[in-house]
Image (tube, grey):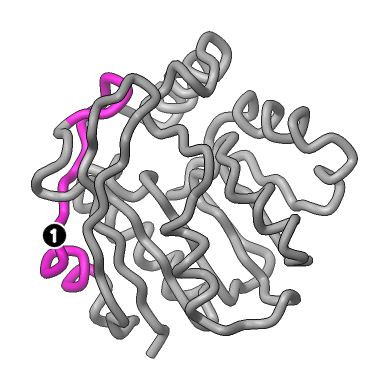
């Protein structure tokens, strides 16, 4: 699937479905917040949420006083939904609409967070492009959450790439040192369970 088709797919998803109709919705992203807190950075840390869509993570980060937040997603509609939800607070956030593999950052980030975007990259070229962009534009920490080897093989009708601690760490070992990995069961709005692996890394 090329970039234009991917964009079309995700615009359609966010145009036609509410948060309670998509599997990735979380009321409160505890795991992501725990990882972000564990790094011990100040509220001025530059944080990017890659593939953030209309996730609630940005709401909680703003509530906690973080001042430098960027949300990136391939779907403009997803970001519009997040902005609508946040109201005036949306002005405190930088919003970027692009395919992550075409992302050309104008700044570097202290924390790069990605829950469930990386696993949609299914070709070696897409994966290496992502890793290259991450290596060049992360100053400190990386948090990645993907479907585990016990998780789904598809999401939203698209194939995904499953990972475990070893395979995820191996992908990023050239530029990053693994801090820790955990597996987590995510309960979807439809009461089904999806098993995730989350890993945190420190830039070499």
State the image quarter where residue 197 is shown: bottom left
Q: Which span of residues is magenta-colored?
A: 154-171
Establish if 150 lies above or below 187: below
Q: How many marks?
A: 1
Asked if residue 127 is among those painted magenta in the image, a careful observer would answer: no
| Residue 96, horizontal then vertical, whole percent | 66, 45
Task: State the SS at label 1.
Answer: loop
Q: Closer to the camera, 163 or 99? A: 163
Instruction: Give residue 22's position: percent from left, percent from top.
Output: 42, 22
Residue at image x 46%, y 33%?
25
Residue lying furthest right in this view?
A: 88
Front residue of 157 and 121? 157
Q: Quadrant of the C terminus?
A: bottom left
The percent coordinates of residue 186 (x first, y second) are 31, 41
118 to the left or right of 104 = left
Q: Residue at x 22, y 37 (%)?
A: 160
The residue under the point 35% across, 65% down is 131
As displayed, is residue 165 above or below residue 49? below
What residue is disc 1 on?
Answer: 164
């Amino acid at each position: 699937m090329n970039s234009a088709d991917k964009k079309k797919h995700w615009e359609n998803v966010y145009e036609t479905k509410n948060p309670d109709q998509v599997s990735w919705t979380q009321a409160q992203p505890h795991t992501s917040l725990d990882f972000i807190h564990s790094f011990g950075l100040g509220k001025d840390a530059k944080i990017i949420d890659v593939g953030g869509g209309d996730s609630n993570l940005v709401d909680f980060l703003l509530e906690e006083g973080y001042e430098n937040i960027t949300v990136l997603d391939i779907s403009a509609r997803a970001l519009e939904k997040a902005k609508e939800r946040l109201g005036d607070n949306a002005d405190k956030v930088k919003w970027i609409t692009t395919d992550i593999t075409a992302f050309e950052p104008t700044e570097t980030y202290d924390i790069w967070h990605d829950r469930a975007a990386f696993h949609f990259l299914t070709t070696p070229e897409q994966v290496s492009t992502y890793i290259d962009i991450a290596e060049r534009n992360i100053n400190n920490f990386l948090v990645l959450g993907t479907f585990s080897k016990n998780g789904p093989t598809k999401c939203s009708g698209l194939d995904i790439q499953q990972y475990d601690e070893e395979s995820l760490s191996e992908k990023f070992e050239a530029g990053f040192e693994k801090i820790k990995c955990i597996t987590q069961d995510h309960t979807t709005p439809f009461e089904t369970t999806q098993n995730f692996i989350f890993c945190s890394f420190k830039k070499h």
